[in-house]
Each structure stands twice: as structure tokens, then as C-alpha cells.
Image (cartoon, rainbow, N blue to C red):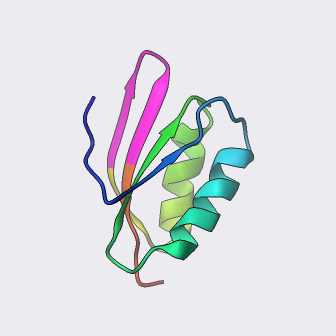
């Protein structure tokens, strides 16, 4: 599984709500249009990360899962 991005956030081993809390903090550091790869092992991220993106105006570009690892690629929106 290869997802290219300018930044990476690895939340492996963390459970709700920690992955989204760390995601929120990391996205705040990015410039509009930059991309972030998020790696997670918590299945609830399949619900939480798409909602996070929709609610805050970020673009979810890729959502992949393999062997219990969830990988997301998002682009920071202007919101």
C-alpha cells in the first residue's frame, strides 16, 4: 500500500478519540492544499476521519485498508 503525501501522521495503536485529536492538531500545522497521510489501526477511523474531513472542509483523497491498517490521504481545505 503506497500513498504519497507531503506529511505523515502515524496513529497506530491508538484508539478513539486519540487518532482524530492528533489529526486535528496536525492539520492545524499544515498550509491550505498540503497533503497528509494518516496511518491508523483503529477501525473507528473509517467513520471518524471521513466525518472530520466533511465537517472541516478537507478533501479525503484516498481511503485504503489492508491487514488491519487503515491509510488515509487528505488535502487540507481553506476552511
Residue 69, magenta (yes or no) = yes
Judged from this view, the residue extending furthest toward the top is 67
Does residue 22 lie above or below 12 as drawn?
Answer: below
Residue 41, magenta (yes or no) = no
Who is closer to the viewer here, 34 or 47? 34
- State left or right for residue 47 relative to residue 76: right
Does residue 5 lie above or below 67 as drawn?
Answer: below
**At 38% from the left edge and 80% from the top edge, which residue is drawn?**
32
**At 27% from the left edge and 28% from the top edge, which residue is drawn?**
1
Does residue 73 lie above or below 27 as drawn?
Answer: above
> What percent of the width, then of the height, locates residue 2?
25, 35
> What percent of the width, then of the height, locates residue 59?
36, 64
- State left or right for residue 48 relative to residue 1: right
**At 49% from the left edge and 19% from the top edge, which residue is drawn?**
68
Magenta stretch, residue numbers: 62-72
Who is closer to the viewer here, 3 or 50? 3
> What percent of the width, then of the height, locates residue 30?
46, 73
**Picture quarter containing residue 36?**
bottom left
Who is closer to the viewer here, 57 or 1? 1
Amino acid at each position: 500500500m503506497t500513498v504519497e503525501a507531503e506529511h505523515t501522521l502515524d496513529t497506530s495503536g491508538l484508539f478513539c478519540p486519540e487518532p482524530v485529536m492528533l489529526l486535528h492538531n496536525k492539520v492545524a500545522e499544515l498550509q491550505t492544499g498540503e497533503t497528509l497521510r494518516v496511518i491508523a489501526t483503529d477501525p473507528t477511523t473509517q467513520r471518524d476521519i471521513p466525518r472530520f474531513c466533511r465537517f472541516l472542509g478537507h478533501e479525503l483523497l484516498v481511503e485504503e485498508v489492508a491487514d488491519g491498517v487503515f491509510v488515509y490521504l487528505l488535502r487540507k481545505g481553506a476552511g
